[in-house]
Image (spheres, rainbow, N blue to C red):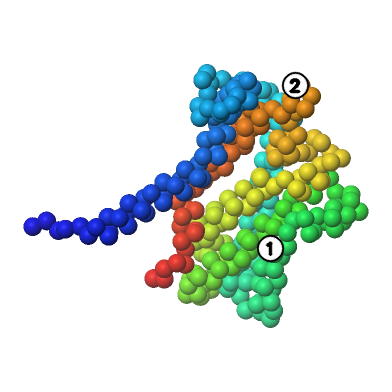
Amino acid sequence: MRRRVKPARVVGQVFFWLLVAVIFVYLMFPFYWAIVSALKTQAELIRTPATLWPDQPVLTNFRSVLSNDRFVRAMGVSTLVASSVTLLSLVVGAFAGYALGKMRFKGKAPSLYVILAMTMFPQIAVLAGLYAVIRVLGMPAIPSMILSYMLFTLPFTVWVLTAFFRGLPDSLLQAAQVDGATLFQAFRHVLLPLTAPALVTTGLLAFIQAWNEYLFALTFTIIDPPSRTVPVAIALFTGEVARQEPFGEIMAAAVIVTVPLVVLVLLFQQRIVAGLTAGAVKG
């Protein structure tokens, strides 16, 4: 005897998958439109009404972007800056998370609240003062951007890793100490490997934030154009004709700079999911 499916359950499933489809289209359409626009000619880009797919797809915009020396140099600068910010944030954040999550000392709770409070300041609020300090110190543009980005990536990294270290069983640390391991050896050989999902998740988020940052990069590279990052280089694209916006090249550049982020997410998707769901279930 077949089991009857309740109509309310069917309606609920249909509504759920319809909602998933709407969210998927809403999230993916900008990226789809960027690809379509990058494959169009300038004449087709200004045509009305707009077409959902180019009549004759061309790779002219991609060739023009990849042959642009300023854009290629900006890709290298962005890779250097984002990688440095990610590495420094993970190193400092791992040590700080270990100390705040597993050690006992006075002022630990206020320290956590101070770290959390640092994430509440908008970039524009600290830009003027930070730029004045950097000018007084005479720091080059690239180190200035690395240190400035860490003001926003490091507090988040420390907070997440602190929660992750706190969730690890104390018995692991105690067993390592019984076996003669020091605090640093227990951190390096026992606890740190277990935090790989959290390290990957926070590292990827720090990389994305540093890769896409625009305001600080624009300010710190005003007098040092060779140190411009990708967002600044794309914003300063100029057309062949005065007052012409090279929409095709801008979209092609946007697609190119998005590909590394998509590849990183696909490579580490399992660890990202594990890092995001860690601590949700005890056992």
Q: Nearer the viewer, residue 33 or 229?
A: 33
Q: Residue at x 71, y 25 (%)?
A: 68
Identify residue type, mark 1: Thr
Q: Is residue 144 above or below residue 244?
A: below
Crowd tier of the residue under label 1, counting other residues whose Cα lies within 10 Å: few below 14, some 14–19, many 20 or above: some
Q: Is residue 115 above or below residue 255?
A: below
Q: Nearer the viewer, residue 142 or 122?
A: 122
Q: Residue at x 62, y 32 (%)?
A: 251
Q: Quadrant of residue 8?
A: bottom left
User: Residue 50 at what x, y percent from top left?
Assistant: 56, 28
Q: Is residue 223 above or below residue 138?
A: above
Q: Residue 110 has which mark?
A: none
User: Residue 27 at what x, y percent from top left?
Assistant: 51, 45
Identify residue type, mark 2: Glu
Q: Residue furthest bottom?
A: 106
Give the residue number, with chain letter if any, for mark 2.
Answer: 240
Please tell me whether mark 2 sits on a helix, a strand or a loop.
loop
Q: Residue at x 46, y 61 (%)?
A: 277
Please tell me whether mark 1 sits on a helix, a strand or a loop.
loop
Q: Is residue 256 left or right of residue 276?
A: right
Q: Nearer the viewer, residue 102 or 283?
A: 283
Q: Is residue 184 left or right of residue 196?
A: right
Q: Given this view, does label 2 or label 1 mark the residue nearer the observer?
A: 2
Q: Is residue 256 above or below residue 3?
A: above
Where, quadrant-wise, is the C terminus in this rendering? bottom left
